Amino acid sequence: MEKEMEKRWYVVHTYSGYENKVKANLEKRVESMGMEDKIFRVLVPMEEEVVNKDGKQKIVMRKVYPGYVLVEMVQTDDSWYVVRNTPGVTGFVGSTGSGSKPTPLLPDEVEGILRHMGIDEPKPKIEFDLRETVRVKVGPFANFVGTVEEILLDKSKLKVHVNMFGRETPLELDYTQVEKI
């Protein structure tokens, strides 16, 4: 059985100057081929640059990595095929041949690129309040009922106290592991 695939960021090599065209083509292909559940975001890393033209300062958008596009996707044979065969794509960075699978970017590499572009990773919406009663949905503490004692925004986690063997026991749980009662 194949292990559950996760969405990761990959770097795609394009013809220089065709980055935005590749982005548009790939987004159209994802929609027309029904790949929205496997290919999520396509980015051309850009930054603002101040240039002097005719004695005036002007802000222009400059490509940070000319010839490259970032693609957030779950790597499957289908998603790899769709991206690889998009017009203007010459290949994935990190693959050793035409049939080999690419290597994803490391999470801290992606974080740095997105931060540089002024884009943050989407954070889950917090739907819990302090002192709220919740039930644990999964894991060894499934069906335990507890109270939200702390909300850890930066980690997307909650500290929940559950009653176990007559004692308050603190648990650190992901937002997705609990539900409101």
Image (tube, rainbow, N blue to C red):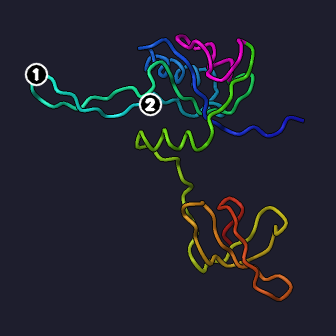
- Residue 152 lies in the magenta stretch: no
- For label 2, count other residues whose C-alpha is less than 10 Å away and answer few (under 14), some (14-19) or many (20+): some
Residue 96 location, quadrant: top right
Pick whichever, 154 or 178, lies toward us.
Answer: 154
Q: Whole-percent x and y of residue 8?
A: 64, 36
The Cα atoms of the two marked residues, 1 and 2, are separated by: 27 Å
Q: Whole-percent x and y of residue 58?
A: 19, 30
Residue 9 location, quadrant: top right
Disc 2 residue type (three-letter):
Pro
Quarter holding the N terminus is: top right
Q: Residue at point 52% right, 47% down?
A: 121
Q: Whole-percent x and y of residue 138?
A: 79, 61
In primary-sequence order, the first of circles 1 and 2 is 2
Disc 1 residue type (three-letter):
Asp
Find residue 54 and name its label: 1
Q: Could you tell me if the residues under marks 1 and 2 are in contact, i.e. CB atoms within 8 Å?
A: no
Local secondary structure at mark 1 = loop
Which residue range is magenta in the image? 80-98
Q: Residue at point 71% right, 13% down?
A: 97
Check the image and name the residue furthest to the left: 55
128 shown above or below 55: below
- Residue 87 lies in the magenta stretch: yes
- Disc number lying in front (1 or 2): 1
Pick whichever, 32 or 99, lies toward us.
Answer: 99
Pick whichever, 108 or 20, lies toward us.
Answer: 108
Find residue 45 and name its label: 2
Local secondary structure at mark 2 = loop
Q: Whole-percent x and y of residue 105?
A: 62, 34
